[in-house]
Image (cartoon, rainbow, N blue to C red):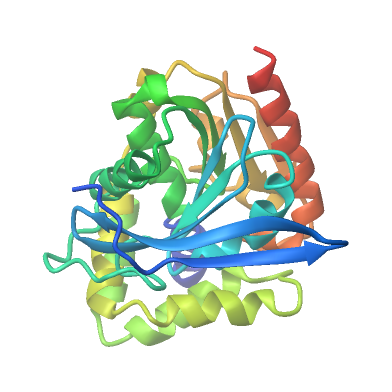
Amino acid sequence: MSLHKIRFVLLAGIFFACNSKDTSVENTKDTTMGITLELEQRTRIKGPAGSLFVDDGGKDGIPVVFLHSFGGTTEHWEKQLEHLRKTRRAVAFDFRGHGKSDLPMDSEYSTQSIAEDVKAVVDSLGIDRFILVGHSMGGASAITYASIEPERVAGLVLVGTPGKTPEAQAKPIIASLESDQYDKVMDDYMKSLLVDAKPGVDSLVLKGSKKISKEASLIIIKEIFAYDPLPMLQRYPGPKLIVATTREAEQPNALFKQLGDVPYKTVSGTSHWVQLDKPEEFNKILDEFIKKVEHK
C-alpha cells in the first residue's frame, strides 16, 4: 500500500473521534388543526469557553443528547431530533469553534474541554440523566464525559468513533498536515470520507469543515491521535453501542475490534455521516437501543 493510501486509512480514524442562559431564544412552532405543538427551542448557553448554540426540544422519555463530528453542527442531527421529539426530549449543540458557538479564546479543543461543555449544556437545561450519542470526534468527547459522570449517562452510542492509533503511524500524518500540503491533504481526506454520500450531504459537511482554521484543525487532530478511549470506556459501566460503516469496520483501529465485549452495528452504502445518508436506518438502530435502555 502506498504512503498516500496509508495516510487516508489512518486519517479515517481521526474524526470517527457558569450555566446561565442569555436572552436570545428562538421558538419554532407548528399549528395543525388548531393544535399548537412546540417543536424546538434554539438558545445560547454560557459554556466554560464562551457561548454555545443549543437546539433543544421535545418532552417525556429519557432525553437524548447528540454530539457532532469535526466541522459539524446541530444540522447533522436534524433528522434524529425531528424523529425523537415525537416521543421524548432531544438536544444537540454546536461545539466550541463550530457553527454558531463562540471560538475558544485559549484554542482549547481537547475531549476533556468538550466534555465540560456537555456538562454546561445539560446542567443549564436541567437534564439529570440522558442517553449520549457521539459521532466521530463527538464520540471521543462522549466517552470522556461518560467516564467523568457515568451515573448521568443512561446509555452511550458511539458512531464512527475511532480506537487508539499507534504513535508511529500518527507522526507522518501530522507531519504532512503541518507542511505546505495541508490544504490538499485535508481536501482529499474529506472527499475520501464522503464516498457514497447522498446528494446534499457532501455540501453540508464541506461547508462546516472549511470553516475550521488550520490551527484549530491541527490541535483537534493531534488531540484525537493522542486519545486512548479504552481506559475511559472501561470506567463507564452502562449500556453501550458502536455504529460504524462497513468501510470503517475494516480499518485496523476500528473501536469495536479493540472492545470485543461491546455490541456493534454496521451500515453499508453510506459515507462517514451515517445519520445523514441513511437517517431511517440509523433512527431504527437508535430506537432499538433506547428501548433496551428504558426497559433495563
Task: Let me know if residue 2 appears in the view.
Answer: yes
Residue 127 placed where, x, y %? 43, 35
Q: Nearer the viewer, residue 141 or 100?
A: 100
Residue at 56% from the left image edge and 49% from the top image edge: 160
Residue 74 placed where, x, y %? 52, 63
Residue 159 left/right relative to 212: right
Quarter occupied by the C terminus: top right
Q: Nearer the viewer, residue 225 or 84?
A: 84
Residue lying at the far front in this picture: please name it. 34
Label count reads 0
Residue 134 left/right relative to 114: right
Quarter occupied by the N terminus: bottom right
Q: Is residue 146 above or below residue 66?
A: above
Q: Nearer the viewer, residue 48 or 126?
A: 126
Residue at 34% from the left image edge and 53% from the top image edge: 169
Res 262 quadrant in image: top right
Q: Nearer the viewer, residue 153 or 189?
A: 153
Q: Is residue 145 above or below residue 224?
A: above
Task: Let me know if residue 1 appears in the view.
Answer: no
Q: Is residue 100 above or below residue 269?
A: below
Residue 14 placed where, x, y %? 42, 56
Residue 287 placed where, x, y %? 74, 36
Residue 181 left/right relative to 69: left
Residue lying at the far right in this picture: please name it. 33
Residue lying at the far top in this picture: please name it. 296
Res 75 quadrant in image: bottom right
Residue at 44% from the left image edge and 50% from the top image edge: 138
